[in-house]
Each structure stands twice: as structure tokens, then as C-alpha cells.
């Protein structure tokens, strides 16, 4: 199987070729077609199996096809991650795969000033990669709106629950449209993850 056979946009295939990615990993081969066809996906994958590409590629594919609504660009995809390191890593992957697309990727995490993040949000964002705590700070201030979210991704959901982010995640989920695609990736699927997914 090749990335071409998965039905990704030419701009994405070009970025994959630039990085010498030729064959999808098992999680990519299984998840990408489902995400592309609009399904909600619960994906089990350990770190290092290529799961970021399993959601980033089809999300970018979707955003590249839909023209954003007129006016300032509000986030259309939200990826929630447990740590700042992962936020940076996931955002870098989105930028790498989306390098031939005109989409803005922004990260929100704590431990740094709010002002640069507020300025990035004002400039317009397509993909927002955020840690739950800092995202709630921005929601409380009104510096970010989630009413344009088409795809919600929870990455490393098991770690987010272990780190006590469940109340924050629930608050955020209540702020995104009910009509959306939801992708949840986790290394383990204990009952709390299944409950969160449902």
C-alpha cells in the first residue's frame, strides 16, 4: 500500500515525498481512509508508530478542500495534547505535512507569555494544537473562539486523563460544535477512555 492509494491531496503527497515517506504504517493505513471519509475514529497506537500523521494528514486534506468562512480565520481543527513538548512536536508535523498548503498552525501551552499567543490567534489560525489548561485560559479571556471547529483530536488521551485533564477536556468539548468529527488516539483503552470517547 502507498500514500497515493489512500486518496490524499497532491500537495500532501508532495510533502510526504519531500520527507521520503513512502509506505504508511499500520495505524496510518487503517485510520487515514476512515478519517478522510468523515468517520469518528478511536485509534490505539503507541508513541513512535506514526499516529500523528494518521490524523494530521487527513485533517490537512479536509481543511485544504474546504474554503474557510469569510472574515478572520478561526480554528477549524483543534488538537488537544497533554504536554508542551508534544504540542510543539504535533504542530511541527502539521507544518511539515502542510508545507505546500496555505494553512496556519498555532500552538497554545503554558509556561510562556500569553501575549504572543494572542497575537498569533488574531492573525488567523486553521489548526490549533493546545494543552487543555492554557486553552481554557484563552477561552476565559475570549482570545480564542472554538465555534468554527470541524475536527477535534484528542492525542494521548490516556496521558491526559492520568494528568487530571478530564474536567478541562469536558469544558473544552462543550465549547466546540456538536456537529464535528472527533478523533481520539490513545495507547491504552481503559474504561475511562471509552467513556470519554462515547
Image (cartoon, grey):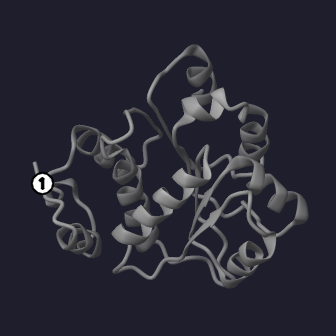
Residue at the spot of label 1: 2
The quarter in which the C terminus is drawn is top right
- The residue sitting at 42% across, 49% down in the picture is 38
Q: Residue furthest right?
A: 141
Q: Residue furthest top?
A: 191
Q: Is residue 21 left or right of residue 160?
A: left
Q: Considering only vertical position in the picture, is 108 above or below 121?
A: above
Whole-percent x and y of residue 182? 54, 43
Secondary structure of the residue carrying tag 1 is: loop
Q: Is residue 188 left or right of residue 11?
A: right
- The residue sitting at 17% across, 70% down in the picture is 17
Whole-percent x and y of residue 34? 34, 43
**Any part of residue 128 in sight:** yes
Near-viewer residue (165 or 185):
165
- The residue sitting at 47% across, 58% down in the picture is 89
Whole-percent x and y of residue 191? 58, 14
Q: Residue furthest left?
A: 1
Amino acid at each position: 500500500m502507498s500514500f497515493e492509494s489512500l486518496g490524499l491531496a497532491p500537495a500532501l503527497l508532495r510533502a510526504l515525498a519531500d520527507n521520503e515517506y513512502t509506505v504508511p504504517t499500520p495505524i496510518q493505513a487503517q485510520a487515514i481512509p476512515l478519517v478522510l471519509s468523515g468517520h469518528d475514529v478511536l485509534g490505539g497506537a503507541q508513541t513512535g508508530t506514526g499516529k500523528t500523521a494518521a490524523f494530521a494528514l487527513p485533517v490537512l486534506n479536509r481543511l485544504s478542500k474546504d474554503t474557510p468562512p469569510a472574515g478572520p480565520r478561526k480554528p477549524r481543527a483543534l488538537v488537544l495534547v497533554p504536554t508542551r513538548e508534544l504540542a510543539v512536536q504535533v504542530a511541527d508535523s502539521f507544518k511539515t505535512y502542510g508545507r505546500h498548503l496555505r494553512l496556519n498552525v498555532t500552538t497554545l501551552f503554558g509556561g510562556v507569555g500569553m501575549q504572543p499567543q494572542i497575537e498569533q490567534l488574531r492573525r488567523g489560525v486553521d489548526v490549533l494544537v493546545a494543552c487543555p489548561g492554557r486553552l481554557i485560559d484563552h477561552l476565559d479571556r475570549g482570545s480564542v473562539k472554538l465555534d468554527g471547529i470541524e475536527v477535534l483530536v484528542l492525542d494521548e488521551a490516556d496521558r491526559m486523563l492520568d494528568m487530571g485533564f478530564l474536567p478541562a477536556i469536558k469544558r473544552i468539548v462543550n465549547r466546540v460544535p456538536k456537529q464535528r468529527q472527533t478523533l481520539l488516539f490513545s495507547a491504552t483503552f481503559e474504561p475511562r477512555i471509552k467513556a470519554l470517547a462515547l
